[in-house]
Image (tube, rainbow, N blue to C red):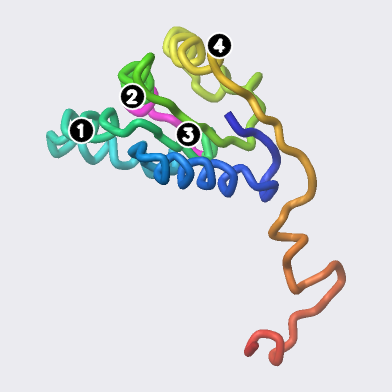
Amino acid sequence: MLTGPTGVGKTWLACALGQQATRKGYSVLYKRLSRLIEEIEIAKADGSLPTLRGSISKKQLLLLDDWALCPLTALGRQELLEIIDDRLGSSSIIITSQLPIEDWHTYLGEATTADAILDRIVHQSHIIKLSGESMRKKMSPLKAGAVLTKEAEDE
């Protein structure tokens, strides 16, 4: 689990780990949690949910990016539990989040399902808390107090 404020490199680090896993021959799937929840909702409606679950469970590493940036529906919460449960003991998950882990239970909502999800992902995980200023801000051509001119926009 990689946590920390926006821009500190959580996604970059998760993707670097995913690329290294791919180079070592592991199958990897990257999903932003909000998009995964959207795919789950669509798959439920069109009857392809078992196929989606199966394709996700076949990957040896699942990267779940931007955990807790979108609200979870009851279906999303339950299917997240199913996806995580399918991976227990057989594959790995990397989760990135701006939300501190101690606030995940509240984010997940319904207490019983939240307990089940967190019990499966927290107790056997490595937790890396990143800190610092946003890398995007540090690398931006715009500095504090700078004004973007038409010439700068054209470059």
Q: Residues within 10 Å of mark 1 (few under 14, many from 20)?
A: some
Secondary structure of the residue carrying tag 4 is loop
- Of the pair 119 and 150, the residue shown nearer to us: 119
Mark toward the viewer: 2 or 1? 2
Question: Residue type at mark 1?
Answer: Lys
Quickly name the residue at label 3: 71
Quickly name the residue at label 4: 123
Tell me, for residue 105, which label it has, or none: none
Determine the residue positioned at 20% across, 33% down. 44
Tell me, for residue 83, which label it has, or none: 2
Secondary structure of the residue carrying tag 3 is loop
Question: Residue type at mark 2?
Answer: Ile
Which tag, 3 or 4, sits closer to the chain's start?
A: 3
Which tag, 1 or 3, sits closer to the chain's start?
A: 1
Question: Residue type at mark 3?
Answer: Pro
Q: Residues within 10 Å of mark 4 (few under 14, many from 20)?
A: few
Q: Could you say where residue 25 lies in the image, as x and y percent from the top left?
A: 35, 40
Mark toward the viewer: 2 or 4? 4
| Residue at far front of view | 24
Q: Could you say where residue 98 lies in the image, as x and y percent from the top left?
A: 63, 37
Q: Residues within 10 Å of mark 2 (few under 14, many from 20)?
A: some
Tell me, for residue 44, which label it has, or none: 1
Residue 104 higher or lower than 97, as above or below: above
Verify CB contact (< 8 Å) between mark 1 and mark 3: no
153 vs 80, left or right, is right
| Residue at far right of view | 145
Q: Could you say where residue 74 lies in the image, as x and y percent from the top left?
A: 36, 23
Determine the residue positioned at 72% across, 37% down. 130
The span shown in magenta is 70-77
Secondary structure of the residue carrying tag 2 is helix
The residues bearing labels 2 and 1 have C-alpha atoms spaced at a distance of: 14 Å
Residue 69 in magenta stretch: no
